[in-house]
Image (cartoon, grey):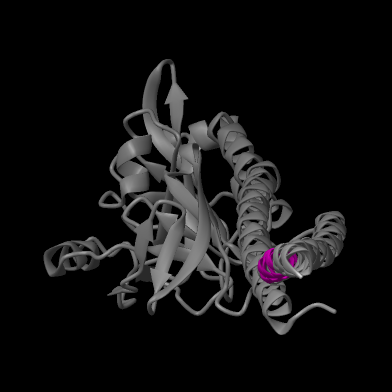
Amino acid sequence: MIGTKPIFKASLILIIFILVFSSLIIISIKLLAIENSKNLLEATSFAISEKIKLEYLSKISLANRWLAQNEEVVEVLLNRTKQDNKILFSILQTIKESNNASIVYIINSNGDVVSSSSYGENKSLTGKNYAFRPYFKNAIKGDNYVYAAVGVTSLQRGLYFSAPVYYKGKIIGVSVIKDGLSAVDKILQKIDYGAFITTKEGIIFATNEDNLYKSISKLSEQRIAEIKESNQFADREITNMNWKFKKEKIIVDNKQLLFFRNNFADANLDIIVHTKKETGYVISPLQRTILVTFSLIGLFLMILSYFIVLLYYKNKEYDRNLKKAHNQLEKKVEERTKQLKLKNEDLEKFNKFAIGRELKMVELKKKINELEFKLKRKK
């Protein structure tokens, strides 16, 4: 029968093992889930980037470069044909419709629009001057440029694709395609994670969340005033989100969200994909199966260890009781030996006394016999 003390010790060891093992399992699950989320964020970010590049940015950029080389565009910039002539208008309108763009137009070297497709209710930009716009300033210098802005005329958000128009090696104007980002918005809306595209200043320009025109980094009041003065976002109010980016995490309201950042180098844009507040870390079915298997094995080993510990304490208690019984037996033998020794000593004393008495009796009888003999002789 095992005492309560060994059972208590074994139970305590089992509880400690369970706590340590459970902690290791929980930590392993969390680390594994975080790594999975990072990989999913990275894969999602690259998938979105490639989809937007192939189906959107590259497509419109190629269309705009083709437009910049069109003979009708060159002719109108050289003032050889009328502005908004039917042939060029038809070309601009076709490019607009085939690319689902907002508007397509041609700007001369002074920044004046000399030909435009329609936008809205048959409106046109012809006659407007956009020499102040960065997409014109960069293209007139020879760069193919992509600029995120809100139209100062249409007040609609979009990406402006600009390309220089050459004639005999000289830049004579700029072709522009503006896209309203409807295709990009559709792509972002299909993502389960939080996702947004920002300008180089960190201002959100496309998103699947309610944070449009907010800055992911803290901008100074002076910088916000400069952006407003540039009319890049027209009358839209620019505010700071006060998100703190720390390595692979975003700190939002004292909560940490994982994120991954990718960029569109040719478009001066970044894409950020992040976990949402309500989105938990995930593990795959295979990983879940492996963790459950290891948990069951661990539980079995802990129960086995429990019985091994019980057996150990049982043997230890048996040895202790055996030693105790042996010591008690030795003590009893020693006490019994002492008792026998005392009895032997008493017996020896008695024997000595009895023998001595007999010897004295023999000697006394001998003396009596001698006296009797002497008495008889005298008579």
Majority SS type along the magenta span: helix
Which residue: 62% across, 47% down? 49
From where the camera sits, is residue 340 visible?
no
In this view, 357 is above or below 246: below
Q: Is residue 350 rendered magenta in the image?
A: yes
Which residue: 55% across, 77% down? 277
The percent position of residue 171, horizontal first and vertical second, equals: 37, 27
| Observer-nearest of 293 and 234 | 293
Q: Is residue 76 left or right of residue 305?
A: left
In this view, 203 is above or below 135: below
Which residue: 69% across, 42% down? 54
Q: Is residue 178 left or right of residue 240?
A: right
From where the camera sits, is residue 20 visible?
yes
The percent position of residue 123, horizontal first and vertical second, equals: 52, 70
In the displayed orientation, state which residue is furthest to the left. 222
| Observer-nearest of 330 and 41 | 330
The percent position of residue 189, horizontal first and vertical second, equals: 67, 70
- Where does the C terminus fall, quadrant-wise? bottom right
In this view, 277 is above or below 373: below
- Where does the N terminus fall, quadrant-wise? bottom right
| Observer-nearest of 303 and 74 | 303
From which residue to which does the magenta span run? 346-360
